[in-house]
Amino acid sequence: MAALRGSVRQLAKLNSSFSCSRRGLATGRSTISRFSKPLLIGGLAAGTGLGWLYKNKDNFKTRVNEAISAVTPTPVFAAAPPASQPSVFSQGKDHALYLWIHLKPTANVKEVGRVCAKLQNLVDQVTDPKMSDESDEIWAGVGFGPNIYKQLGGNPKENYTYAYRKGTLGEMPSSGGDVFIHAKCNTVSKLFELSQLFLNSLPAGSVDNAEDIFSFVYQNGRDLSGFIDGTENPADDDSRQNVAVEKDTGGSYVITQKWIHDLKLISTEKDKTMEGWVGRTRADSIELKKKTTSSHVARMTGGTNFEQKKAFEMVRQSMPFGNVTGEAGLFFIGYTASPENLNFMLDRMVGAGGDGVSDDIMRLTKNVKGTYWYFPGVAELRKMA
């Protein structure tokens, strides 16, 4: 190959030299010395004289180009995963909608599926795609609980049943659910419109109960506890897609949890104590070199080593929600290519199947609701229409 590449370079030089020869003839400067001796390159005899080259210039240039093309490698690109829904690995917005729906047993599941398949049409009704900009564009996706997804003809590659868990510092209820909408927008009123429009589009009498939560960015990306949220989240779109998307389908397994913070405790507890619980500094989110096995960082990475690589990853899209006079906390949502990633993290939080150590993060917040969803790829979703 090295010899072949050298031949190509020589051929390219000859091609260039030919052009120089013509310029030399035009200006009266002789360049014939370049071709005074025959040159054999890759079986091609060249340099039999400037007159020969000039008379056969078209044939010579064609043979040069063919030789170059013959050894130019053809680019090989890895096949991209099937298209994912807009919410899956896109970046965050100033606000998000989390619409959690339980259907009645009598609901017409097929009709519900048709409405879900047309979610983007509803988004376009709220914000005209021809007129939208960053201030009001909406990125939305729809997920399904295991039971309804099977009723809709879905066949997920992995089991994504959400198990009830309990540890020494609290429980993680398994709340179930049938349909979940996650939408992001910089204008919260647009998300309100979308929630209203989606619920009104479902078949009459099909909803048993629903909860819509609207989140916001707090202090440039901090949780209500004052800690920076999602410090080690994949940053660029390629990394986010790699972590969040099932390669064969474009689908994603999603966890949603509602956490209610103890704001009184957070406002009175010493920073050093809470930093020990989290495993990071509160001001700038620097990982502590010495951590307890019960710190949140240690529970999530699987050990107390400094900057230990996580065994599993997800694309976190969690945001604060609530109000001062009522409940407030974190709506936790994460996208991943396999529910195995999620099970590992939740088991570590309550010490299930391991050392029995619970996550200290549960000292300052309480989990009141949680489940898994599957967000099918765009092609899968369209089949429900």
Image: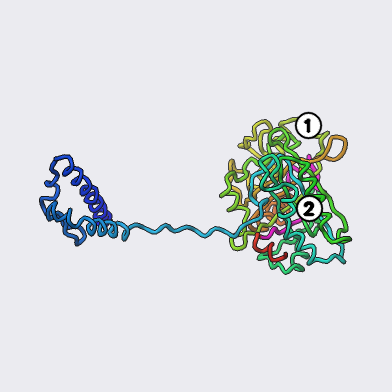
Circle 1 residue: 269
- Tell which of 66 and 73 is nearer to you: 66
Name the residue nearer the viewer: 154 or 301: 154
For residue 32, side relative to residue 106 (left or right): left
Which corner quadrant of the image does residue 201 belong to? bottom right
Dot 1 alpha-carbon crowd within 10 angstroms: few under 14, some 14 to 19, many 20 or more: few
Provide the residue designation for mark 2: 370
Coloration mode: rainbow
- Dot 2: what SS? strand
| Residue 259 sits above or below residue 248 on the image | above
Give the label on residue 306, or none.
none
**Residue visible at 28% across and 54% down in the picture:** 5
Kind of residue sitting beneath label 1: Glu
Q: Are marks 2 and 1 in contact (CB under 8 Å)?
A: no
Q: Foreground mark, 2 or 1?
A: 2
- Report whether residue 209 is seen: yes
Q: Residue at x 69, y 66 (%)?
A: 383
Whole-percent x, y for residue 217 in the image: 72, 37
Query: Residue 65's spot in the image, x, y percent?
Result: 29, 57
How many other residues sit within 10 Å of disc 2, few (<14), some (14-19) or many (≥20)? many
- Give the CA separation, mark 2 to mark 1: 27 Å
Q: Residue 101 location, x and y as percent?
A: 82, 56
**Residue positioned most to the front:** 26
Q: Earlier in the sequence, mark 2 or mark 1?
A: 1
User: In this orientation, does residue 169 appear?
Assistant: no
Look at the numbered disc 1 and give the secondary structure of its residue. loop
Looking at the picture, how far across and down is residue 4, in whole percent? 26, 57
Query: From the image, which quarter does the C terminus lie in?
Result: bottom right
In the image, the segment drawn in magenta is 356-376
**Three-letter amino acid code of the residue under disc 2:** Gly
